[in-house]
Image (cartoon, rainbow, N blue to C red):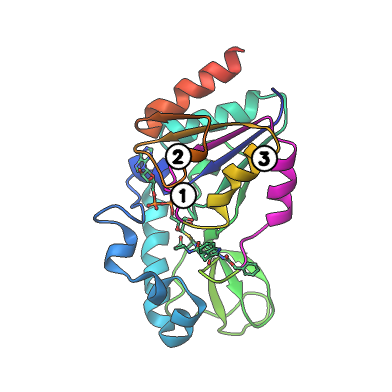
Amino acid sequence: MQNIVILTGAGISAESGLKTFRAEDGLWENHPVEEVATPEGFARDPDLVQRFYDDRRAQIRAAKPNAAHEALGRLDREWGGELLLVTQNIDDLHERGGAGRLLHMHGEALSAWCRACDARHSWERTLRDGPPCPACGAAALRPDIVWFGEMPYQMERIFSAIAQADLFVSIGTSGAVYPAAGFVQEAARVGAHTLELNLERSAGSGFFDETRLGPASALVPQWVEQVLAK
Ligand code: BV8
């Protein structure tokens, strides 16, 4: 077993204190998704959306990677085969957990995107006060986030990694949002073994060869130990 593709969702950062989306006190509870995570919502009320992501950016900066992030960092350092960690999360806890072979398919909270000159800038401050773009000076910065109806990032790289995968592992995701929710079927189609690590069964559980239920901070270090022991 050489080539591994891992998909993560909000559940892997829950134990770092970052809200998930669909839990009862989830992110979508207090902010209707169409208001804060669509280009239409941004056009309608940019201040509401900028404040939503400014708050999340501050929460992310205050958060710390947990044992699940750390274990994936270790796997990345010690795994001699191909490895691609695809996250739906906009936080940087995978990077701070030591992962390098990583991509954010739905964007990053700590990045700002200029709609005037298309430049992207790492961004730790707020955007609500309309700061000028460091490259072109225009007050046209938006969160560098993939909103609903927008094309996720690096889809070719993701599909070519899945096409070579021997093992596909999904961690902390409800399988409710596409195209991410469809990756397991693609992995199964190319003959990869598919494993789900999640607190509860997800919408996609039926597509996995194996599902292990429990908190990521316990399941992920256990699984990484197992894989590296082989
Ligand atoms: C697109 C960034 C078109 C913003 C996000 C096919 C069928 C139906 C609908 C569609 C379809 N194809 C496209 C659509 C439309 C839409 C979609 O899927 N809608 C859904 C609602 C039905 N998809 C899109 O719009 C996508 N774009 O398709 O573009 C296109 C195509 C070609 C060309 C041009 C355009 C873009 C979707 C991306 C939107 N942006 N995030 C932000 O973060 O604010 S999505 C966002 O929601 C997350 O990134 C993530 O993807 C999703 C949330 O899911 P999870 O991360 O799984 O979180 P959730 O809370 O749901 O679940 C947490 C899980 O963790 C639970 O299972 C829980 O049990 C578990 N858990 C909790 N604690 C723990 C734990 N597990 C372990 N340990 C714990 N401690």
Residue 153, given in percent of the width and then of the height, sits at 64, 60
* Residue 109 falls left or right of residue 51: right
Could you say which quadrant of the image residue 144 lies in? bottom right
Question: Mark 2 and 3 residues: CB-CB less than 8 Å, in contact?
Answer: no
Residue, disc 2: 205
Which quarter of the picture shows residue 111?
bottom right
Q: Is residue 116 left or right of residue 64?
A: right
Q: Residue at x 46, y 49 (%)?
A: 175
CB contact under 8 Å: marks 1 and 2 = yes
Write down the residue under mark 1: 175
As displayed, is residue 77 above or below residue 203?
above
- Residue type at mark 3 is Arg
Mark 3–mark 1 Cα distance, whole angstroms, equals 17 Å
Is residue 64 visible from the viewing direction of this image? Answer: no
Magenta residues, start to end: 151-176
Amino acid type, callout 1:
Gly
Task: Look at label 2 and name its amino acid.
Answer: Ser
In the image as oriented, which residue stretches furthest toward the top? 229
Secondary element under disc 1, as helix, strand or loop, is loop
In this rendering, which labeled residue sits more in front, label 1 or label 2?
A: 2
**Quick check: is the Cβ at mark 1 less than 8 Å away from ligand 1?**
yes
